[in-house]
Amino acid sequence: MRSALRTLALVGAFAVAPMIASGANAQSWPNRQIFFIVPFAAGGGTDAFARPLAAQLDKQLNQRILIENRAGAGGTAGAAAAAKATPDGYSFFVGATHHAIAPAIYPKLTYDILTDFAPIAMISRPPHVIVVNPQKVAAKTLKDLVAEASAEPGKLNYGSAGNGTTHHLAGELFKMLTKTQIAHVPYRGAGPALQDLIAGHINMTFDGLGSSAAAIAAGQIRGIAVAAPARVPAFPDLPTAKESGLDGYDVATWYALWAPKGTPDDIVKRMRAEVAAALKETSIKDAWERNGSDVPSLEGDAFGAFVASEVERWSKVVKSAGVKLEGG
């Protein structure tokens, strides 16, 4: 009888141990620096939102959050690294719309955005904007840009954050709708593409407003139109594509935070709560507005379902546009 009771006690102890450990995770986390893996080069749209958010979370968690830029393969190299990160609550992934597009572009991904990560929350949702180098492109309106591109097919080029990214597909969708020929120049992130646009090495980009906003405001590049249903408060003089005569051109790059699959549930829930609190801060709201983004409220399972719908949506766009990888 005593032996049986001792066995039951041991079984109970082992069953309770994971719960105790989980509780300990929540109570002690975080006790060292946290890494946000950003799968694009520094200076792009992801950085424009990841860095201010990380700075705010620094204050809330009283722990340093470091941005680790891992560019390459249209954002999939960094995503693959994040999927393999130790799921201990000290590595998180800051991804974007690109990662809902990737399954249709890269048939041999080593990760699954829907099953290899725990969704934390969407953090921002800026629309895309058509921007040109004012020294390289004469057009000041969308109508003029289409006319310029049509006059000499293939002469104009556009930079993107990489093959298969939102920037790439936004350009291909534009070409489809306007029946123009514009050469695609893929980069290792939106940051390098933007710098080359400013320098005049490329003619235009179909960029997330989050990364182009400062350069537009400074007059380094010219905004032609936003790919959104309504004008953006931060740029009231910038018309929408629809206003400019191009129906159906509605593209946004959303950014979001995930944890590697297996991260303790209590830590995932804690980070969701911290992100929700951070997005309510006035400093964050102001920064998001300057970058042309609203402040989304989409987290957990609801956000996961949204990502699944985006994977389906972009798969149809890729198929319809006949997009093929151009190497890299």
Image (cartoon, rainbow, N blue to C red):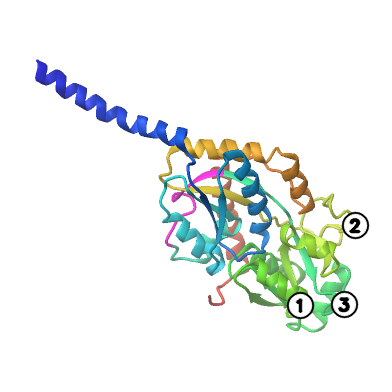
Q: Which amino acid type is shown beneath numbered disc 2?
A: Asp
Q: Earlier in the sequence, mark 1 or mark 3?
A: 3
**Left or right, 313 with reference to 286:** left
Q: Secondary structure at mark 2?
A: loop
In the rendering, which numbered label is found on residue 138?
3
Q: Which residues are magenta?
A: 110-120
Q: CA distance from mark 1 to mark 3?
A: 16 Å
What residue is pinned by disc 1?
Answer: 199
Q: Nearer the viewer, residue 313 or 16?
A: 16
Counting other residues with Cα less than 10 Å from the Cα at mark 3, is it few (<14), some (14-19), or many (20 or more)? Answer: few
Q: Which mark is residue 258?
A: none
Q: Is residue 266 above or below residue 226?
A: above
State the CA–CA distance, disc 1 to disc 2: 24 Å
Say which residue label 2 marks: 237
Q: Residue 28, how many percent across, how many down?
A: 45, 36
Image point (79%, 84%), residue name: 152
User: Residue 67, image x and y in percent?
Assistant: 57, 56
Q: Nearer the viewer, residue 79 or 157?
A: 79
Q: As shown in the figure, which amino acid type bears the numbered disc 1? A: Ala
Say if 307 sits above or below 60 in the image.
below
Of marks 1 and 2, the one in the foreground: 1
**Is residue 243 inside the magenta stretch?**
no
In front: mark 1 or mark 3? 1
Residue beneath the point at 49% across and 66% down: 106
Precedes in sequence: disc 1 or disc 2: 1
From the viewer's perspective, tell me whether residue 258 is left or right of residue 25.
right
Does residue 317 appear left or right of residue 83 in this picture?
right
**Quarter of the figure that contains the N terminus:** top left
